[in-house]
Amino acid sequence: MTEWLNWLLGLLTLAAGGGWFFDKKRHRQEVRGIKAENEKKDMDLAKMYVDEFKTNIADPLRREVRGLKKEVKNLNNAIGKIQECPHAGECPVYDELQKQQADDDRIEREGGEP
């Protein structure tokens, strides 16, 4: 009877161990599935953040830079025509621009900031 009981306990232990092995395998598969699902959610969230950044920050900045480039171009064109003006010798705008340029040059030579 004892031998019979030892065999029965051995079989039960083996069955329990085998169940643990298969349960562990299933658990690993579930974990892999959850990880893959989380990675997909992270990618979707990152894409949403990029779209929001583009819509709320990058596109308005791009429009602003485009407008500033146009204004600088117009200003450069106007400054280029100062020499054609009959009042160029006494132009206060031209004098102020020359003062600012001299100050900028001095600061650059000194290695400081304006």
Image (cartoon, rainbow, N blue to C red):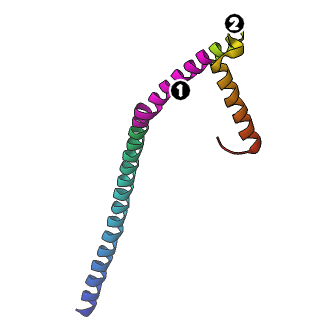
What secondary structure is the stretch in magenta mostly built from?
A: helix
Q: Identify the residue at image location x=44%, y=28%.
A: 60
- Side of 29 where 65 appears, left or right: right
Q: Quarter of the image containing the N terminus?
A: bottom left
The outermost residue toward the left is: 1
Residue underneath mark 1: 65
In the figure, 64 relative to 114: above or below?
above
**Amino acid type at image mark 1:** Val
Pointer 2 local density, CA inside 10 Å: few below 14, some 14–19, many at least 20: few
Q: Position of residue 75 (x, y in %)?
A: 60, 18
Q: Position of residue 94 (x, y in %)?
A: 67, 20
**Amino acid type at image mark 2:** Pro
Q: Is residue 14 magenta?
A: no
Q: Position of residue 65 (x, y in %)?
A: 53, 26
Q: Identify the residue at image location x=71%, y=40%.
A: 107
Residue underneath mark 2: 86
Q: Secondary structure at mark 2?
A: loop
Q: Secondary structure at mark 1?
A: helix
In the figure, residue 68 lies in which quadrant?
A: top right
In the figure, 48 relative to 87: above or below?
below
C-alpha separation, residue under disc 1 versus residue under disc 2: 34 Å
- The earlier-in-sequence mark between 1 and 2 is 1
Q: Identify the residue at image location x=38%, y=61%.
A: 28
- Side of 113 where 29 appears, left or right: left
Q: Which residues are magenta?
A: 51-75
In the figure, 103 relative to 96: above or below?
below
